[in-house]
Amino acid sequence: GESVGLHLPTLSVQEGDNSIINCAYSNSASDYFIWYKQESGKGPQFIIDIRSNMDKRQGQRVTVLLNKTVKHLSLQIAATQPGDSAVYFCAEIVGGNKLTFGTGTQLKVEL
Amino acid sequence: GAVVSQHPSRVICKSGTSVKIECRSLDFQATTMFWYRQFPKQSLMLMATSNEGSKATYEQGVEKDKFLINHASLTLSTLTVTSAHPEDSSFYICSARVPSGGTENIQYFGAGTRLSVL
């Protein structure tokens, strides 16, 4: 079946370095993607989104890249801070309504 | 972003009892809310879509008689876990879709409810 998945379950980075979190998706009909951040014991927090007709979108310290040719999505976090430590999920919109979440990547920021 | 409030944040109950979880959109009206379940170190799994004024739509494998959903107003959806058992222990999270008028429908999430059934 269709699914959204992540390449790396855990990513450790030094404070101040840039982080890149990857996501592979398989549903070629997906037209909208969202990155969420989830801290321990909390609900997911919206970070940034991107439509399928775009290949890059930037926010504050974050950039999302979309490569539809290889069905790959990435989240780049600039100057990673301890507060960025969390689990990051990519999610795709299916049928214009439901979200399908990837497996998640644990980002650990080392001081 | 939009604020979604979920209550309670944690509940401990005895096996066989029922537990109600509330999800409220605080600064917007949500015709559609969603209920997810999350096991430790796993992703969110959609349980059901809650539609204001109509019956919820359940995902395959989710027992609708066990997980009762009511969406009586544009700002409140409730999930009742009936006759809870230890295997129902999990992290339950709701979300509300913010109407944008376009194809994008960003979901904002509540803080989650940790259910522990003894």
Image (cartoon, grey):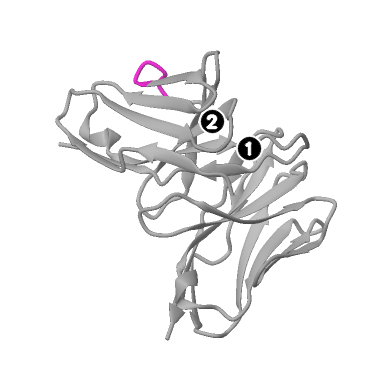
Residue that numbered label 1 is attached to: B98
In the picture, residue B17 is in which quadrant? Answer: top left
Q: Is residue B69 left or right of residue A99?
A: left
In the picture, residue A21 is in which quadrant? Answer: bottom right
Q: Which residues are magenta?
A: B62-67
Q: Is residue B65 magenta?
A: yes
User: What is the secondary structure assignment of the residue under circle 1?
Assistant: loop
User: What is the secondary structure assignment of the residue under circle 2?
Assistant: strand
Residue drawn at x 73%, y 41% as measured from the top left: B104
Q: Chain of mark 1?
A: B
Considering every residue shown, the one lying at the far front of the view is B27
Q: Is residue B61 visible?
A: no
Q: Choose between A20 and B5: the one closer to the eye.
A: B5
Residue drawn at x 81%, y 61% as measured from the top left: A55
Q: How many marks?
A: 2
Q: Chain of mark 2?
A: B
Type of the residue with mark 2: Met
Q: On the same chain: label 2 and label 1? A: yes
Q: Which mark is residue B24?
A: none
x and y, in percent, of residue A37 in the image: 52, 58
Within 10 Å of the Cα at label 2, are there few (<14), some (14-19), or many (20+) other Cα atoms?
many
Q: Is residue A49 left or right of residue B82?
A: right
- Measure the C-alpha gap from mark 2 to mark 1: 9 Å
Q: Which mark is residue B33?
A: 2
Mark 2 and 1 residues: CB-CB less than 8 Å, in contact?
no
x and y, in percent, of residue B59 in the image: 51, 27
Residue drawn at x 34%, y 31% as measured from the top left: B21
Q: Is residue A33 visible?
A: yes
x and y, in percent, of residue A56 in the image: 79, 63
Q: Is residue B82 left or right of residue B104?
A: left
Q: Choose between B107 and B16: the one closer to the eye.
A: B107
Type of the residue with mark 1: Val
